[in-house]
Image (cartoon, rainbow, N blue to C red):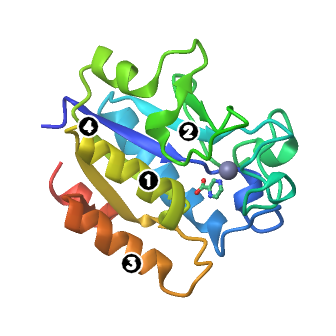
Amino acid sequence: MKTASALLIIDVQNDFCPGGSLPVREGDRVVPVLNRYIELFREWKLPVFASRDWHPAITSHFRDFGGIWPAHCVQGSEGARFHRDLALPEETIVISKGLDPNRDDYSAFQAATESGMPFPAQLEAMAVRKLYVGGLATDYCVKASVLDGVRHGLEMILLEDAVRGVDLNPGDSAKAIEEMVRAGAVLMNFSKMRADD
Ligand code: VGL
Ligand code: ZN
């Protein structure tokens, strides 16, 4: 039974896809896969969360202001929008992170809903105990979120066929997956998922 479960889609935004300002190689390839997971979670009437990187134009997260990244996912910009083919259901709970110009946040557990409810509190209110996670980028926000989820005592399932990484250094994504598994995350893919529903 998957009663206490939810899907968490991380940062499938234009700037992280080919053509964006901080493109993840094959970032857009996660979209059709995530759409199939979305279908499953709808079928099971389970919640879908979508996180977004949502930065002010001036933030210490950006290269020009002391950080390491080119400007990306600036609030309200085209680059910050979810990929147009990502079929988010109307009931999707959008959570935003990276709003504080003085912090370098990556984890969805630092995000809040549009009404300002912190993500961990939202999960608790909905009695969610298990998160299925896919999206971008494996070696940054996905990793940080999965490790945080484990720390929060949640069961964290990494959807291996629905993630892609930045790989600033070659092998970063593979290492990130190892690290998540070592921490207690479980690897899942679409065919396994169907088999044990
Ligand atoms: C991310 C780098 C900078 C991510 C966000 O969503 O993984 N990566 N900001
Ligand atoms: Zn960012």
Q: In which quarter of the image is ligand 1?
A: bottom right
Earlier sequence position, callout 4 versus callout 2: 2
Residue name at image x 51 percent, y 22 percent: 91
The residue carrying mark 4 is: 152
Q: Nearer the viewer, mark 4 or mark 2?
A: 4
Circle 1 sits in a helix, a strand or a loop, which is it? helix
Please give left or right for residue 73 compared with residue 51 in the image.
Answer: right
The amino acid marked with disc number 1 is Ala
Residue 48 location, x and y as percent?
44, 33
Earlier sequence position, callout 4 versus callout 3: 4
The amino acid marked with disc number 2 is Ser
Residue name at image x 53 percent, y 37 percent: 50
Q: Quadrant of residue 44?
A: top left
The span from disc 1 to disc 3 (Cα, nearest Å) is 13 Å
The residue carrying mark 1 is: 144
Earlier sequence position, callout 1 versus callout 4: 1
The span from disc 1 to disc 4 (Cα, nearest Å) is 12 Å
**Total residue callouts:** 4
The residue carrying mark 3 is: 175
Earlier sequence position, callout 1 versus callout 2: 2
Earlier sequence position, callout 1 versus callout 3: 1
Residue 81 location, x and y as percent?
76, 41
Which of the two residues, 144 or 123, is positioned nearer the viewer here?
A: 144
Q: For mark 2, does the 10 Å Cα neighbourhood hold few (<14), some (14 to 19), or many (20 or more) residues? A: many
Please give left or right for residue 186 compared with residue 164 in the image.
Answer: left
Which of the two residues, 165 or 27, is positioned nearer the viewer here?
A: 165
Residue name at image x 81 percent, y 61 percent: 70
The amino acid marked with disc number 3 is Lys
